[in-house]
Amino acid sequence: MHISVRNLYIGRNLSSDAMSRYSFFLRLAMVKSILLLLCSVSSGQTDSLLRQGMRFHDEGKFREALECYQKVLESDPTNAEAMYEMAYTFMSTGDYKRAAAYAKNSIRKGKTPYAGSYAVWGSSLDELGQREKALKVFDEGMKYFPEDHLLAYNKGLTLYRMKRYREAEQILCRSVRLRPSHPGSHLLLAYAEAELGNRVKAMFPLYFFLLIESRTERSKTAWEMLASLQVKGMTSDRPGKISASMHSREDSDSLGVFE
Protein backbone atom coordinates (compact mmCIF):
# COMPACT_ATOMS: atom_id res chain seq x y z
CA MET A 1 0.00 0.00 0.00
CA HIS A 2 1.32 3.38 -0.98
CA ILE A 3 1.32 6.12 1.67
CA SER A 4 2.09 9.57 0.43
CA VAL A 5 4.50 11.88 2.13
CA ARG A 6 1.61 14.32 2.58
CA ASN A 7 -0.38 11.70 4.52
CA LEU A 8 2.60 11.01 6.76
CA TYR A 9 2.98 14.74 7.37
CA ILE A 10 -0.67 15.11 8.28
CA GLY A 11 -0.40 12.03 10.49
CA ARG A 12 2.51 13.54 12.36
CA ASN A 13 0.54 16.76 12.86
CA LEU A 14 -2.45 14.85 14.21
CA SER A 15 -0.24 12.93 16.59
CA SER A 16 1.37 16.16 17.75
CA ASP A 17 -2.05 17.78 18.29
CA ALA A 18 -3.22 14.80 20.28
CA MET A 19 -0.13 14.95 22.47
CA SER A 20 -0.67 18.68 23.00
CA ARG A 21 -4.27 18.10 24.04
CA TYR A 22 -3.23 15.26 26.34
CA SER A 23 -0.55 17.46 27.90
CA PHE A 24 -3.06 20.31 28.34
CA PHE A 25 -5.66 18.11 30.05
CA LEU A 26 -2.98 16.53 32.23
CA ARG A 27 -1.84 19.96 33.42
CA LEU A 28 -5.48 20.99 33.94
CA ALA A 29 -6.11 17.89 36.05
CA MET A 30 -3.01 18.65 38.13
CA VAL A 31 -4.15 22.25 38.69
CA LYS A 32 -7.61 21.04 39.73
CA SER A 33 -6.07 18.56 42.16
CA ILE A 34 -3.90 21.26 43.70
CA LEU A 35 -6.87 23.63 44.00
CA LEU A 36 -8.99 20.92 45.61
CA LEU A 37 -6.19 20.20 48.05
CA LEU A 38 -5.83 23.89 48.89
CA CYS A 39 -9.60 24.22 49.33
CA SER A 40 -9.61 21.18 51.58
CA VAL A 41 -6.83 22.64 53.72
CA SER A 42 -8.58 26.03 53.78
CA SER A 43 -11.88 24.41 54.76
CA GLY A 44 -10.16 22.49 57.53
CA GLN A 45 -8.53 25.66 58.83
CA THR A 46 -11.87 27.48 58.70
CA ASP A 47 -13.63 24.76 60.69
CA SER A 48 -10.80 24.70 63.21
CA LEU A 49 -10.94 28.48 63.70
CA LEU A 50 -14.72 28.43 64.06
CA ARG A 51 -14.59 25.66 66.67
CA GLN A 52 -11.82 27.46 68.54
CA GLY A 53 -13.82 30.69 68.48
CA MET A 54 -16.89 28.92 69.87
CA ARG A 55 -14.81 27.45 72.69
CA PHE A 56 -13.45 30.90 73.53
CA HIS A 57 -17.00 32.28 73.50
CA ASP A 58 -18.27 29.57 75.84
CA GLU A 59 -15.36 30.33 78.19
CA GLY A 60 -16.25 34.02 78.19
CA LYS A 61 -13.12 34.96 76.21
CA PHE A 62 -15.01 37.13 73.76
CA ARG A 63 -12.04 39.09 72.37
CA GLU A 64 -10.22 35.89 71.47
CA ALA A 65 -13.40 34.47 69.92
CA LEU A 66 -13.83 37.56 67.74
CA GLU A 67 -10.23 37.28 66.56
CA CYS A 68 -10.85 33.71 65.40
CA TYR A 69 -13.97 34.67 63.47
CA GLN A 70 -12.20 37.68 61.94
CA LYS A 71 -9.45 35.42 60.58
CA VAL A 72 -12.10 33.28 58.89
CA LEU A 73 -13.71 36.34 57.30
CA GLU A 74 -10.35 37.61 56.05
CA SER A 75 -9.99 34.48 53.93
CA ASP A 76 -13.70 33.97 53.24
CA PRO A 77 -15.67 37.26 53.47
CA THR A 78 -19.00 35.56 52.68
CA ASN A 79 -18.79 32.90 55.39
CA ALA A 80 -22.25 33.17 56.94
CA GLU A 81 -21.38 31.04 59.96
CA ALA A 82 -18.44 33.27 60.92
CA MET A 83 -20.59 36.39 60.56
CA TYR A 84 -23.32 34.81 62.67
CA GLU A 85 -20.84 33.83 65.40
CA MET A 86 -19.40 37.37 65.32
CA ALA A 87 -22.91 38.76 65.75
CA TYR A 88 -23.71 36.39 68.61
CA THR A 89 -20.47 37.26 70.41
CA PHE A 90 -21.00 41.01 69.96
CA MET A 91 -24.53 40.61 71.34
CA SER A 92 -23.12 38.73 74.34
CA THR A 93 -20.83 41.69 75.06
CA GLY A 94 -23.70 44.17 74.80
CA ASP A 95 -22.51 45.66 71.51
CA TYR A 96 -25.92 45.45 69.86
CA LYS A 97 -25.09 47.75 66.95
CA ARG A 98 -22.31 45.52 65.69
CA ALA A 99 -24.33 42.43 66.50
CA ALA A 100 -27.19 43.67 64.33
CA ALA A 101 -24.80 44.63 61.51
CA TYR A 102 -23.02 41.26 61.40
CA ALA A 103 -26.25 39.29 61.73
CA LYS A 104 -27.76 41.26 58.86
CA ASN A 105 -24.65 40.70 56.72
CA SER A 106 -24.78 36.99 57.51
CA ILE A 107 -28.22 36.92 55.90
CA ARG A 108 -27.77 39.40 53.06
CA LYS A 109 -24.18 38.60 52.04
CA GLY A 110 -23.57 35.10 53.39
CA LYS A 111 -23.63 31.98 51.26
CA THR A 112 -26.01 30.11 53.56
CA PRO A 113 -28.29 32.11 55.91
CA TYR A 114 -28.87 30.83 59.44
CA ALA A 115 -32.10 31.00 61.41
CA GLY A 116 -29.97 32.10 64.36
CA SER A 117 -28.86 35.15 62.39
CA TYR A 118 -32.46 36.35 62.27
CA ALA A 119 -32.81 35.72 66.01
CA VAL A 120 -29.68 37.73 66.82
CA TRP A 121 -30.53 40.52 64.37
CA GLY A 122 -34.07 40.93 65.66
CA SER A 123 -33.07 40.65 69.32
CA SER A 124 -30.29 43.22 68.87
CA LEU A 125 -32.77 45.64 67.28
CA ASP A 126 -35.06 45.00 70.25
CA GLU A 127 -32.26 45.92 72.66
CA LEU A 128 -31.59 49.07 70.61
CA GLY A 129 -35.24 50.08 71.05
CA GLN A 130 -36.13 49.39 67.41
CA ARG A 131 -38.83 46.89 68.24
CA GLU A 132 -41.10 47.35 65.24
CA LYS A 133 -38.11 46.65 62.99
CA ALA A 134 -37.27 43.66 65.17
CA LEU A 135 -40.74 42.21 64.61
CA LYS A 136 -40.29 42.53 60.84
CA VAL A 137 -36.97 40.70 61.05
CA PHE A 138 -38.54 37.86 63.04
CA ASP A 139 -41.40 37.63 60.54
CA GLU A 140 -38.94 37.44 57.64
CA GLY A 141 -36.99 34.75 59.45
CA MET A 142 -40.11 32.69 60.18
CA LYS A 143 -41.02 32.90 56.51
CA TYR A 144 -37.80 31.07 55.60
CA PHE A 145 -37.49 28.99 58.77
CA PRO A 146 -41.09 28.26 59.85
CA GLU A 147 -40.05 25.36 62.10
CA ASP A 148 -37.51 27.32 64.14
CA HIS A 149 -38.87 27.74 67.66
CA LEU A 150 -36.33 30.39 68.69
CA LEU A 151 -37.62 32.86 66.13
CA ALA A 152 -41.13 32.46 67.52
CA TYR A 153 -39.83 32.69 71.09
CA ASN A 154 -37.83 35.85 70.45
CA LYS A 155 -40.72 37.50 68.66
CA GLY A 156 -42.83 36.64 71.70
CA LEU A 157 -40.24 38.22 73.99
CA THR A 158 -40.25 41.43 71.96
CA LEU A 159 -44.07 41.54 71.96
CA TYR A 160 -44.07 40.94 75.72
CA ARG A 161 -41.70 43.86 76.26
CA MET A 162 -44.02 45.98 74.11
CA LYS A 163 -46.89 44.94 76.43
CA ARG A 164 -48.70 43.33 73.51
CA TYR A 165 -49.55 40.33 75.66
CA ARG A 166 -52.30 38.80 73.52
CA GLU A 167 -50.02 38.65 70.47
CA ALA A 168 -47.19 37.36 72.64
CA GLU A 169 -49.46 34.60 73.93
CA GLN A 170 -50.28 33.45 70.39
CA ILE A 171 -46.70 33.32 69.11
CA LEU A 172 -45.40 31.70 72.31
CA CYS A 173 -47.97 28.93 71.96
CA ARG A 174 -46.45 28.32 68.53
CA SER A 175 -42.96 28.21 70.05
CA VAL A 176 -44.11 25.65 72.62
CA ARG A 177 -45.66 23.49 69.90
CA LEU A 178 -42.47 23.63 67.84
CA ARG A 179 -40.20 22.74 70.78
CA PRO A 180 -42.06 21.51 73.89
CA SER A 181 -38.74 21.02 75.70
CA HIS A 182 -37.72 24.71 75.47
CA PRO A 183 -38.06 26.06 79.04
CA GLY A 184 -37.94 29.76 78.18
CA SER A 185 -41.04 29.50 75.99
CA HIS A 186 -43.07 27.99 78.84
CA LEU A 187 -41.85 30.58 81.34
CA LEU A 188 -42.52 33.56 79.09
CA LEU A 189 -45.93 32.16 78.17
CA ALA A 190 -46.74 31.99 81.89
CA TYR A 191 -45.75 35.65 82.26
CA ALA A 192 -47.96 36.65 79.33
CA GLU A 193 -50.94 34.69 80.66
CA ALA A 194 -50.51 36.29 84.09
CA GLU A 195 -50.47 39.75 82.54
CA LEU A 196 -53.70 38.86 80.75
CA GLY A 197 -55.22 37.80 84.07
CA ASN A 198 -55.46 34.14 83.08
CA ARG A 199 -54.66 32.48 86.41
CA VAL A 200 -55.04 28.83 85.43
CA LYS A 201 -53.53 29.32 81.98
CA ALA A 202 -50.50 30.90 83.65
CA MET A 203 -50.08 27.95 86.01
CA PHE A 204 -49.92 25.24 83.34
CA PRO A 205 -46.81 26.55 81.52
CA LEU A 206 -45.17 27.10 84.92
CA TYR A 207 -45.65 23.41 85.71
CA PHE A 208 -44.08 22.45 82.39
CA PHE A 209 -41.21 24.88 82.91
CA LEU A 210 -40.44 23.42 86.33
CA LEU A 211 -40.53 19.88 84.96
CA ILE A 212 -37.82 20.88 82.47
CA GLU A 213 -35.81 23.30 84.59
CA SER A 214 -36.16 22.88 88.34
CA ARG A 215 -32.79 23.84 89.85
CA THR A 216 -31.84 27.26 88.51
CA GLU A 217 -32.28 30.86 89.61
CA ARG A 218 -35.19 31.18 87.22
CA SER A 219 -36.87 28.13 88.70
CA LYS A 220 -36.83 29.72 92.17
CA THR A 221 -38.80 32.64 90.79
CA ALA A 222 -41.12 30.26 88.95
CA TRP A 223 -41.84 28.35 92.19
CA GLU A 224 -42.67 31.62 93.95
CA MET A 225 -44.88 32.74 91.09
CA LEU A 226 -46.69 29.40 91.07
CA ALA A 227 -47.29 29.58 94.82
CA SER A 228 -48.59 33.12 94.40
CA LEU A 229 -51.02 31.98 91.73
CA GLN A 230 -52.17 28.99 93.79
CA VAL A 231 -52.62 30.61 97.18
CA LYS A 232 -52.42 34.37 97.10
CA GLY A 233 -51.86 37.37 94.93
CA MET A 234 -55.09 36.92 93.01
CA THR A 235 -57.70 39.57 93.73
CA SER A 236 -61.09 40.21 92.24
CA ASP A 237 -62.08 43.86 92.03
CA ARG A 238 -65.39 42.98 90.42
CA PRO A 239 -67.08 39.85 89.05
CA GLY A 240 -65.23 38.47 86.05
CA LYS A 241 -62.17 40.66 86.64
CA ILE A 242 -58.96 39.02 87.90
CA SER A 243 -55.64 40.76 88.50
CA ALA A 244 -52.30 39.17 89.34
CA SER A 245 -49.78 40.40 91.89
CA MET A 246 -46.36 38.76 91.55
CA HIS A 247 -43.83 41.01 93.20
CA SER A 248 -40.99 38.48 93.09
CA ARG A 249 -41.26 37.67 89.39
CA GLU A 250 -38.09 38.10 87.36
CA ASP A 251 -37.95 40.96 84.93
CA SER A 252 -38.32 39.93 81.31
CA ASP A 253 -34.69 40.95 80.74
CA SER A 254 -33.65 37.73 82.46
CA LEU A 255 -35.00 35.83 79.48
CA GLY A 256 -32.24 35.48 76.94
CA VAL A 257 -32.29 34.94 73.20
CA PHE A 258 -31.66 31.20 73.38
CA GLU A 259 -33.01 30.38 76.84
Image: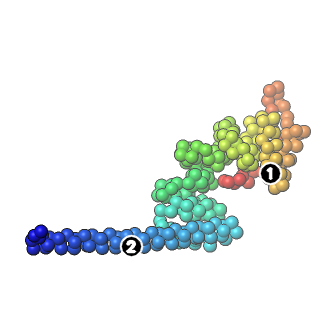
Task: Tell me which residue sits at (53%, 46%) in the image.
Answer: 144
Residue 45 at least partly seen: yes
- Residue 102's spot in the image, x, y percent? 53, 60
**For discs 2 and 1, the disc positioned in front in the rendered view:** 2
Task: Tell me which residue sits at (62%, 64%) in the image.
Answer: 89
- Residue 100's spot in the image, x, y percent? 56, 57
Residue extending furthest toward the front? 1
- Residue 79's spot in the image, x, y percent? 50, 62
Question: Residue 233 occupies which quadrant of the picture?
Answer: top right
In the rendered structure, the answer to whether residue 199 lies left or right of residue 139 reads: right
Q: Nearer the viewer, residue 225 or 87?
A: 87
**Upstream in the sequence, badge 2 or badge 1?**
2
Under circle 2, the secondary element is helix
Mark 2: few/some/many CA within 10 Å (<14, 14-19, 20+): few
Q: Which residue is mark 2?
A: 30
Residue 121 at least partly seen: no
Which quadrant of the rendered structure holds the N terminus?
bottom left
- Residue 168, label in figure: none
- Determine whether 56 is above or below 199 in the image: below
- Residue 213, label in figure: 1
Q: CA distance from mark 2 to mark 1?
A: 57 Å
Q: Mark 1 is on which residue type?
A: Glu
Q: How many marks?
A: 2
Residue extending furthest toward the right? 231
- Residue 99's spot in the image, x, y percent? 58, 60
Q: Nearer the viewer, residue 84 or 256?
A: 84
Task: Tell me which residue sits at (55%, 64%) in the image.
Answer: 82
Mark 1: few/some/many CA within 10 Å (<14, 14-19, 20+): some
Question: Residue 168 occupies which quadrant of the picture?
Answer: top right
